[in-house]
Image (cartoon, rainbow, N blue to C red):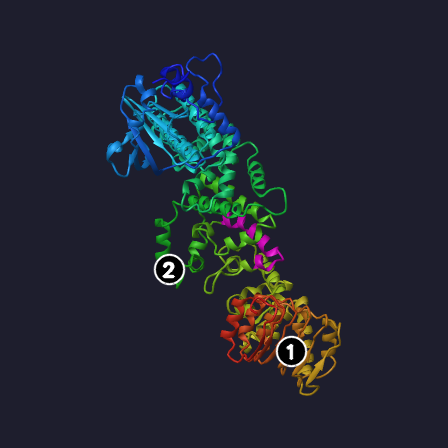
């Protein structure tokens, strides 16, 4: 049987089939995407395989790596000299359907019978080609093995090419794994690694395993050969760098990178190769708990930067590069990942102190064993470490001496936390992450650490946003927060209460000017407040005056002590006299008499309301309308003085959440409240749940959500009339 000008079987095999894979040395192996090799190399021929590969490259065809699939199989066991004629014989075209799986070492059928009774090992495949001549079976891949040929027929050309590239990839990876598992000369190994990387980068297959498989092979190679020179390390790292641009390094490779950072922190590889890898980890990692070695590698990389001549300046530039030049960081995962790295590094500094015998002895001597080992409250995952420190004065005074290396680590990552707090857009999330005080108790007893951390807490206290400075308070009831930790007598206080006073000032200037906050101060921090007031601190003087004004202190002796404290300083005496004047005005305001209904003119302001209420008695005022005026939350200071107020209309005013919180604590008898077209949100509306007398509530055209509405209905049993039109709850 002739092939009409084919030139014979051998010529057909050379020109119309893909060139033999087995005839090439492993270093010369290139994926189907690569251009033909340079002229003059007799071992490589630019046949149809090269042309087809270039066609794929130019058209941008991409395939997913096949792991298994259905395909038709035909096996021809004949000498290769007769193959070209036998393949076209209609008598030998018996096809079997098989479900093939591409394992790491062979092709295996789910039904091991017939042609695929035994697995077909990649090592036995001599050649891998596409059939592409007239009268050949359609969409076929040819696998040549000693003494025969396996034909795989797909349903279409795309699926055929997918099978071809997948088998080719598996075969090459299998060969590279065998070669690199038994290295002889490292100069040859390095060339093989570069060829492996090039193959992965130029493969038309798009799959995570295409880049991960070479990385795992190389990490295994490094793990089994620990006696490499530093130069070999650097050469290997540089060779695999292109694969790391879009892939996280596997755990074993992270271990190798960590070792390099520790042993050669000044190597240019750290800056040039590791920097983009760490940047990608910080931008894209979702959970360090699943890959802790990525976190350790990031930690070691930062410590290596700190070892450079410029030290923390280099680290600062790196942090800035992670944030970006704009005011808003475009990568939401960077901050939590950096905080996780910092916390893990800080914990590592105190490993030898955690659960050490010295702490156990301190617990025994100070009778705090029960406190340290008490059962956690419901929802707690660990004992209250802050409480443990506060009840143990010996531990509070303990001066922990860290080893030199641990001290450098602590200093580096404490400074990084300070850097993070300097970015306005990161500060809210940072405050939230640090609100539970996620540090080891030994660190909180370490004066150097708490001194460094003080800067971060000051940044939180100075921030005007409630979402930031509210994180100074405890994360839940019964657990101390930064506010308590840095208060006079707290474990971290080293400034006689200056930071504590500034925290109180910002909290009182926000929406925390409430009975609840003042009551907590009176119960837990009255002594420090009186001490600071005695020293002339104006914020603490104001706090003591508000405690008297709101009747927070019930004990007469304590009231007299507060009055004596106020009268001991010039600023305290002046503010106490102003308080007495306000109390006299309040008695006059609340004296029985005056109108029962009052409506302020449109465009009235907070000052107009204050001026009106100071003009006489309003003890009988039950209905007040401030609709369409310019009043704000500041007028709540005047409204809470009206003892008989039952109906309040704030329609179309600028009355907001802070005012609602104040009303909810002082006007428990309010029955009708109109908040239509006001800027109130869920944060303020939720506080209304304590106003049990409310029977009519208008929240039309506010930012009320459905969840808050359901919560209010459940907690306000007397609520009968509700208007939620033009809200999410409507």
Nearest the viewer among 407 and 398 is 407
Q: Report the span colored magenta.
A: 447-469
User: Is 81 on the left-hand or right-hand side of 576?
Assistant: left
Instruction: Identify residue for label 2.
Output: 368
Question: Disc 1 on helix, strand or loop?
Answer: strand
The question of residue 573 being in magenta is answered with: no
* Residue in the picture at 75% in, 72% down: 603
Nearest the viewer among 14 and 250 is 14
Task: Please identify the residue farthest to the bottom as the structure is shown.
Answer: 593
Where residue 700 appears, as percent x and y from the top left, is: 62, 71
- The answer, for residue 325, to whether it is visible in the render is yes
Question: Disc 2 on helix, strand or loop?
Answer: loop
What label does residue 648 carry, if any? 1
The question of residue 464 being in magenta is answered with: yes
- The answer, for residue 560, to whether it is visible in the render is no
User: Is 537 on the left-hand or right-hand side of 436?
Assistant: right
Q: Is residue 365 above or below residue 721?
A: above
Nearest the viewer among 28 and 188 is 28
Q: Quadrant of the C terminus?
A: bottom right
Q: Residues within 10 Å of mark 2 (few under 14, many from 20)?
A: some
What label does residue 243 carry, if any? none
State which mark lies toward you, 2 or 1.
Answer: 1
CA–CA distance in space, label 2 to label 1: 53 Å
Q: How many marks?
A: 2
Sequence order check: which comes first, mark 2 or mark 1?
2
Nearest the viewer among 613 and 276 is 276
């Amino acid at each position: 049987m002739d092939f009409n000008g084919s030139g014979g079987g051998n010529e057909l095999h050379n020109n119309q089939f893909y060139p033999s894979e087995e005839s090439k040395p492993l270093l010369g192996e290139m994926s189907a995407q690569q251009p033909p090799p340079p002229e003059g190399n007799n071992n490589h021929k630019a046949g149809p395989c090269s042309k087809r590969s270039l066609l794929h490259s130019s058209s941008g065809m991409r395939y997913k790596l096949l792991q298994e699939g259905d395909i038709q199989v035909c096996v021809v066991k004949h000498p290769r000299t007769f193959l070209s004629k036998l393949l076209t014989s209609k008598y030998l075209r018996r096809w079997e359907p098989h479900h093939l799986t591409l394992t790491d070492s062979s092709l295996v059928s789910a039904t091991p019978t017939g042609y695929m009774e035994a697995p077909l090992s990649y090592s036995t495949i001599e050649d891998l080609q596409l059939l592409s001549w007239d009268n050949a079976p359609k969409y076929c891949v040819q696998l040549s093995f000693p003494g025969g040929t396996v034909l795989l027929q797909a349903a279409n050309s795309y699926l055929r090419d997918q099978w071809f590239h997948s088998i080719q990839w598996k075969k090459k990876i299998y060969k590279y794994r065998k070669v690199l598992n038994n290295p002889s000369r490292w100069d040859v190994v390095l060339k093989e690694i570069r060829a492996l990387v090039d193959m992965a980068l130029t493969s038309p297959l798009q799959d995570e395993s295409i880049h991960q498989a070479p990385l795992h092979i190389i990490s295994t190679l490094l793990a089994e050969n620990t006696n490499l020179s530093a130069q070999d390390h650097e050469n290997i790292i540089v060779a695999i760098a292109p694969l790391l641009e879009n892939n996280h390094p596997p755990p074993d490779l992270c271990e190798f990178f960590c070792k390099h950072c520790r042993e050669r922190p000044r190597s240019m590889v750290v800056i040039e190769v590791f920097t983009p890898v760490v940047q990608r980890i910080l931008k894209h990692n979702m959970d360090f708990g699943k890959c802790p070695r990525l976190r350790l590698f990031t930690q070691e990389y930062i410590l290596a930067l700190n070892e450079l001549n410029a030290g923390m300046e280099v680290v600062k530039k790196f942090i800035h590069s992670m944030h970006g030049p704009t005011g808003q960081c475009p990568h939401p995962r960077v901050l939590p990942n950096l905080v996780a790295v910092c916390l893990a590094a800080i914990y590592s500094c105190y490993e030898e102190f955690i659960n050490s015998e010295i702490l156990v002895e301190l617990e025994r001597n100070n009778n705090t064993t029960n406190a340290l080992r008490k059962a956690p409250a419901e929802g707690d995952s660990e004992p209250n470490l802050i409480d443990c420190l506060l009840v143990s004065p010996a531990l509070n005074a303990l001066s922990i001496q860290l080893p030199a290396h641990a001290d450098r680590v602590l200093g580096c990552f404490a400074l990084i936390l300070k850097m993070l707090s300097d970015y306005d857009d990161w500060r809210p999330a940072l405050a939230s992450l640090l609100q539970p005080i996620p540090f080891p108790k030994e660190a909180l007893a370490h004066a150097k650490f708490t001194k460094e951390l003080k800067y971060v807490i000051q940044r939180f206290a100075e921030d005007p946003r409630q979402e930031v400075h509210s994180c100074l308070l405890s994360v839940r009831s019964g657990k101390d927060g930064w506010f308590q930790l840095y208060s006079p007598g707290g474990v971290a206080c080293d400034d006689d209460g200056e930071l504590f006073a500034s925290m109180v000032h910002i909290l009182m200037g926000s929406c925390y000017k409430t009975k609840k906050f003042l009551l907590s101060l009176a119960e837990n921090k009255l002594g420090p407040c009186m001490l600071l007031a005695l020293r002339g601190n104006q914020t603490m003087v104001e706090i003591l005056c508000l405690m008297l004004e709101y009747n927070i202190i019930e004990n007469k002796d304590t009231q007299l002590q507060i009055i004596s404290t106020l009268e001991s300083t010039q600023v305290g005496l002046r503010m106490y006299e102003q308080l007495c004047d306000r109390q006299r005005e309040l008695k006059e305001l609340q004296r029985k008499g005056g109108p029962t209904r009052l409506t302020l003119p449109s465009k009235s302001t907070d000052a107009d309301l204050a001026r009106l209420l100071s003009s006489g008695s309003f003890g009988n005022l039950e209905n007040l309308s401030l609709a369409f005026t310019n009043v704000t939350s500041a007028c709540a200071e005047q409204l809470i003085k009206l003892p008989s107020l039952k109906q309040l209309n704030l329609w179309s005013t600028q009355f907001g959440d802070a005012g609602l919180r104040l009303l909810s604590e002082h006007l428990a008898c309010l029955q009708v409240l109109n908040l239509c077209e006001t800027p109130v949100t869920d944060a303020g509306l939720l506080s209304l749940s304590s106003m049990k007398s409310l029977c009519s509530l208008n929240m039309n055209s506010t930012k009320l959500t459905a969840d808050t509405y359901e919560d209010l209905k459940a907690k306000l049993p007397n609520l009968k009339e509700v208007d939620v039109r033009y809200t999410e709850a409507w």
